[in-house]
Image (tube, rainbow, N blue to C red):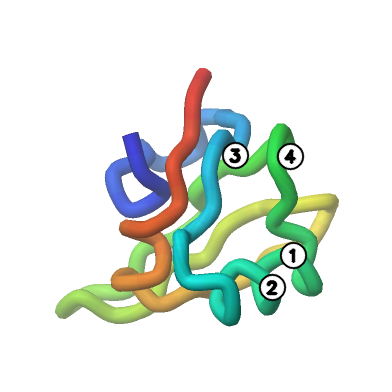
Amino acid sequence: MTLAELPLNKPAKISALPKDEAIAAQLIEQGFTLRSHISLAHKAPFNGPMAFRLHNTKISLQRDIAKQISVSF
């Protein structure tokens, strides 16, 4: 399952980052590390960005990036 498919408020763990090293490096700097706990806080309408709870903060991502991040329960 990817972050883009994650149900609202369902806790998960990040299991894989994007294969693009530049994108993965930016995500790691923002706290998206393997085995981090994450949940979906909000989905903007019309394929807008998604907001996630990560390390006691909310971080938004574009949906195309969220589709590249795998999660497990």
Callout 2–callout 4 Cβ contact below 8 Å: no
The residue carrying mark 1 is: 28
* Residue 13 pos. (x, y %): 61, 31
Instruction: State the SS at label 1.
Output: helix
Label 2 or label 4, whichever lies nearer to me, is 2
The residue carrying mark 3 is: 14
Distance of mark 3 from mark 4, alpha carbons? 6 Å
Distance of mark 4 from mark 1, alpha carbons? 11 Å
Q: Quadrant of the N terminus?
A: top left
Instruction: State the SS at label 4.
Output: loop
Which residue corresponds to the image point at 45% horizontal and 52% vertical from the top-left?
A: 69
* Residue 36 pos. (x, y %): 74, 39
Which residue corresponds to the image point at 20% horizontal and 75% vertical from the top-left?
A: 47
Number of callouts in the render?
Answer: 4
Callout 3–callout 4 Cβ contact below 8 Å: yes
The residue carrying mark 2 is: 25
Distance of mark 1 from mark 3, alpha carbons? 11 Å
For the residue pair 70 and 21, the one nearer the viewer reads as 21
**As shown in the figure, which amino acid type bears the numbered disc 3?**
Ile
Of mark 3 and mark 4, the one earlier in the sequence is 3
Q: Residue furthest left?
A: 46
**As shown in the figure, which amino acid type bears the numbered disc 1?**
Ile
The residue carrying mark 4 is: 36
Of mark 1 and mark 3, the one earlier in the sequence is 3
Distance of mark 2 from mark 3, alpha carbons? 15 Å
Instruction: State the SS at label 2.
Output: helix
Of the numbered discs in the image, which one, if any, rests on residue 18? none
At label 4, counting other C-alpha atoms closer than 10 Å, the crowd grade (few under 14, some 14-19, many 20 or more) is: some
Up the image or down, 50 lies above or below 73; here it is: below
Of mark 2 and mark 4, the one earlier in the sequence is 2
